[in-house]
Amino acid sequence: MPENTSSRHTGNNGSVHDVAVLGGGSFGTAMTKVLAENGHRVHFWMRDPAQAEEVRKTGINSRYMPGIEMSGDIQPTTDLAEAVGKAEIVFVAIPSKAFRAVIREHNSDFRAGQIVVSLTKGIEEHGFKLMSEILQEEIPRCRIGVLSGPNLAAEIANRDLTATVIAAKDPEVRRAVQDLLGCEYFRVYANVDVYGVELGGALKNIYAIVAGLASALDMGENAKAMLITRGLAEMSRFAVSLGANPMTFMGLAGVGDLVVTCTSSKSRNYRVGYAVGKGQQLDDAVRELGQVAEGIYTLKLVKEKSEAIGIYMPLVRGLYEILYGTASIKAVINSLMMAVQNSDVEFILPRTISQ
Ligand SMILES: NC(=O)C1=CN([C@@H]2O[C@H](COP(=O)(O)OP(=O)(O)OC[C@H]3O[C@@H](n4cnc5c(N)ncnc54)[C@H](OP(=O)(O)O)[C@@H]3O)[C@@H](O)[C@H]2O)C=CC1
Ligand SMILES: O=C(CO)COP(=O)(O)O
């Protein structure tokens, strides 16, 4: 493992901490890199022994971050108990489909009071649970937080200027995460609306798929702005109905993350939408991607949930009909454009009650 020769550049008090990152994919790797560059000892858990060996020997995770060399005190491991046991703070970057299973299997390895922060932007299939709710159910003795924002892993790994949000009820959790992660290229803002921040990160993936589709069809810049803005209206309507604070959607974890994923071909969700817009089958697009695109699962769950609770989500419904139904893209666009014309900002002027 190459030694960290660069000087420490955190804005904190300079103390070194043992932290764990669970999940050896793109985002786990990017956050491991930030933490190690900030001078912390990172116990980096992944399930693939060959990958752990590669990171140990070369500092590179070639499957998920080819060409990115990490430096500093990184201890890759396939022993989750060891990683969690040594850590003061644990970051979890495991896709939503596997999140509960991994935490449940290792439940007894977590200590009372240990800080556990979810980096995952998805929803559990059964019961519509967010990752912080899973943590609360599985390890209630821990102090829980959620990190979310416009955070493309490749850009963070490249040290491009980035901001994110730590959401937690406990101010010590917020402060600890700000101190651990903050540095000259990574800035961490705080929020207490855990549910809103977390839901924002999960929901925007749906609209990134829509934006990718629109881009593949060369719909133009006005259309892009319309989709992003109506996506924001739709996701905040849904989240607020479930208890989120509408103001959260004006922040980095709301509109910030929505903008980056709806405008960047670095977003996997956007890429899936783009491929489908170019005529590829969804399954083939996902297989070719080779990484997680949480939005394709979130879409199904949000469509069901919105129907169950009576929340109007035309973009969700339209995308669902394209990806999982039989509707043509053209027919969906036509029905969206010809729907009853509603109010712009429904927090100011209520949406028509005819829909
Ligand atoms: N990439 C990004 O830019 C960002 C991602 N996120 C979120 O982070 C989460 C993780 O995404 P990301 O790292 O990008 O995903 P990737 O597709 O890059 O990697 C997925 C990782 O999860 C591991 N994994 C999959 N299933 C299991 C399992 N059952 N047990 C243990 N490990 C498993 C994979 O291991 P293996 O290789 O062995 O299959 C791999 O290490 C997602 O919710 C995503 O939305 C959030 C912000 C930014
Ligand atoms: O959440 C992300 C950026 O904030 C990453 O988006 P994708 O999962 O679509 O790549």
Image (cartoon, rainbow, N blue to C red):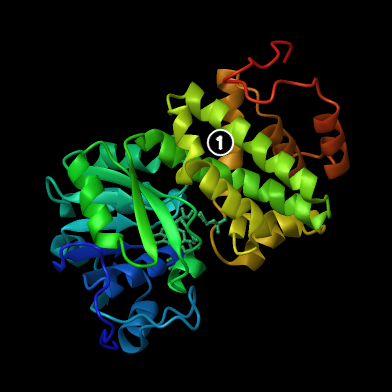
Residue 332 location, x and y as percent?
82, 36
Whether residue 139 appears in this view of the structure is no
Q: The residue tagged with tag 1: helix, strand or loop? A: helix
Front residue of this view, candidates 144 and 85: 144
Residue found farthest to the top: 353
Front residue of this view, candidates 111 and 246: 246
Q: Residue at x 48, y 45 (%)?
A: 201
Q: Residue at x 28, y 87 (%)?
A: 1
Question: Which residue has dot 1 on it?
Answer: 301
Residue 334 in the figure: left or right of residue 292: right
Q: Quadrant of residue 184?
A: bottom left
* Image quarter hosting the C terminus: top right
Residue 52 location, x and y as percent?
34, 78
User: Does residue 341 lie above or below 186 as drawn?
Assistant: above
Residue 71 location, x and y as percent?
31, 82
Residue 306 in the figure: left or right of residue 353: left
Residue 65 location, x and y as percent?
48, 75
